[in-house]
Image: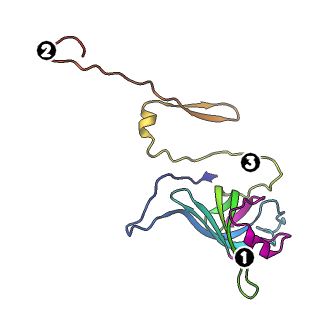
Amino acid sequence: MTLHRSASGGTDRSGIALAILEDRGIFWWNDERVPATHFAPDGSVGGRLTIEEDGEIRLDLDDVMPSGRHPLEYLLDKGNPVERNIQGLLATAGHVLLLNAFRNGTTVRTHNVSKEQYFVQQCLVSDERFKRDGKAPLSFRSVEVDLAGFEDWMWLQSIRVERRKNTLRARYKSPKDRRFCAFDSDSPLPL
């Protein structure tokens, strides 16, 4: 399982911002049951997931996620949190679980394709399907974190790692302030 996160904005040679992940796939509410012989429920919707270098996560769907509500009700929901998590299967990156999503716009059309967009706060990516909401809590075998840019902190031994049977904890301890004295070449005493 990989948690995608970055704080630096990268660009390609043309100056265009690069995405950490941009992939098409199918998406559904995470509390929906997936039949044993299927890879997604019947109510899944096609779309594109983008994770930008600055950490922005956006889901652009080719239709409106199914629910018991009338599609026109979604037009009033922009900026509101979604009450359910979203799971997806991407064409190349594997399975994703989108947590804490907010609707960012819906286009409802009666004689054309409707669309829906979400901003998401967290995105987990895995090779395996995630459990449905309401089942056992998420558990991890591994987490990958890019520590590029933190070399100075590691050199100061300010990050302490503790490993126990079921936990791994990393703590940052700020190093003590250091004082330096300046000496005048004519005087043996500190200034």
The front one of 140 and 121 is 121
Please say whether residue 4 is visible from this viewpoint: yes
> SS class of the residue under badge 1?
loop
Indicate yes or no whether the magenta region holds residue 80: yes
Residue segment shown in magenta: 62-89
Name the residue that disc number 2 marks. 186
Name the residue that disc number 3 marks. 138
Residue 124 place in picture, x, y as percent: 65, 55
The residue that appears at 70% across and 70% down in the rendered structure is: 26
The front one of 180 and 79 is 79
The front one of 184 and 20 is 184
Q: CA distance from mark 1 to mark 2?
A: 80 Å
The residue that appears at 46% across and 65% down in the rendered structure is: 17
Q: Relative to 23, is 159 on the left or the right?
A: left
Q: Earlier in the sequence, mark 1 or mark 2?
A: 1
The front one of 73 and 116 is 73
Q: CA distance from mark 3 to mark 1?
A: 28 Å
Q: Amino acid at mark 3?
A: Leu
The residue that appears at 64% across and 55% down in the rendered structure is: 121
Q: Amino acid at mark 1?
A: Asp
Q: Main secondary structure of the magenta part?
A: loop
> SS class of the residue under badge 3?
loop
